[in-house]
Structure formats: C-alpha cells, structure tokens
Image (spheres, grey):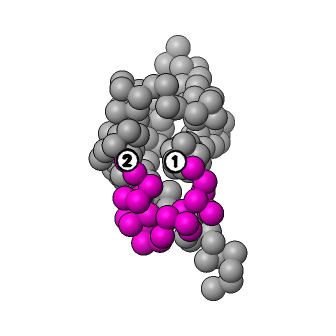
Amino acid sequence: MTPSDKRTETVKQILQAALTVFAEKGYAGATTEAIARRAGVNKAMLYYYVGSKEELFGAAILHLLVPARNTLAAALDQTPHPEEKLPLIQATFAALFRQHPQLPRLMLRTLTTELQRIPQEVLAAMAQVYSLTAAVVG
C-alpha cells in the first residue's frame, strides 16, 4: 500500500467514524476524542488529516453527499423518460441509506436542531440535490 493509499484509507475511516458519532450524539455531543477512538487513530492524526471539529463535520457529510449528488445527476441525465426519473431518485437515496444507515438520522438531527452548524459547502450541495429532485417532481 502506497503512502497515498494509506492516507486515503485513514481519511475514509475518520470520515465514517465522524458520521456515526455525529449521528449518535449530534454536533454538540460529539467529541473529537470519540471520533478518533471510533476511527482507530489518535486525535493528532485526526486533526492532521481532516482538521477541526467543524471542518470534520462538513467533510464527513460532503464525503457522502457529493458523490450521491453526482451519481444522481448523471443517472437523471441518462434517463430520457420522465416517468423513470422519480423511481431513480428513490433508488439512489435508498442505496445511499443502505450503505450509510446513519446518514438519515444525521441529516434529520442536523436540520432540526443544529441548522446553524451546517457549513456553506454542505448547504450548497444539499440545495443542488434538492434542485435535481424538484426538477423531476415539479
């Protein structure tokens, strides 16, 4: 494994751990110690690879949201029939939630109690997903 591969894998572990801890505890209740422990790294490594708790929060959500948005946009572009687009949106989100079951809980918790914590980049990505969906459902 190359150093780049190891770095990528470590960041992925940290982001996955962060998603889980933020979903369980919320932003306020989550600690970098708990995230580092869940990821199997020390806090210094967490800060080195990802940054502060705020940066980690945004990066963890974007880690899932951006690929989902891109997958959804590409699939919708390749689907010429309007009646096939809504089931495609449902299938895309169902697959994402099966793969990352903590994501719905994290998003609901964040949108209802910690809206002020959502970084601008995350809000922009969420707005893009909403726009893709709104274009289909009218």
Q: Residues within 10 Å of mark 1 (few under 14, many from 20)?
A: some
Quarter holding residue 46: bottom right
127 lies left or right of 102: right
Residue 127 belongs to the span the image colors magenta: no
The first of marks 1 and 2 along the sequence is 2
For label 1, the SS is helix
| Residue 88 image point, x, y percent | 48, 38
Residue 41 belongs to the span the image colors magenta: yes
Q: Amino acid at mark 2?
A: Ala
Up/down of 137 relative to 50, above or below? above
Q: Nearer the viewer, residue 9 or 47?
A: 47
The residues colored magenta run: 30-52
| Residue 118 image point, x, y percent | 52, 32
What quarter of the picture does the N terminus occupy? Answer: bottom right
Question: Quick check: marks 1 and 2 in contact, CB under 8 Å?
Answer: yes
35 lies left or right of 129: left
| Residue 134 image point, x, y percent | 54, 20
Residue depicted at x 42% and y 72%: 40
Reading the image, the residue beneath label 1 is 53
For label 2, the SS is loop
Residue depicted at x 51% and y 47%: 53
49 lies left or right of 53: right
Up/down of 125 relative to 34, above or below? above
Reading the image, the residue beneath label 2 is 30
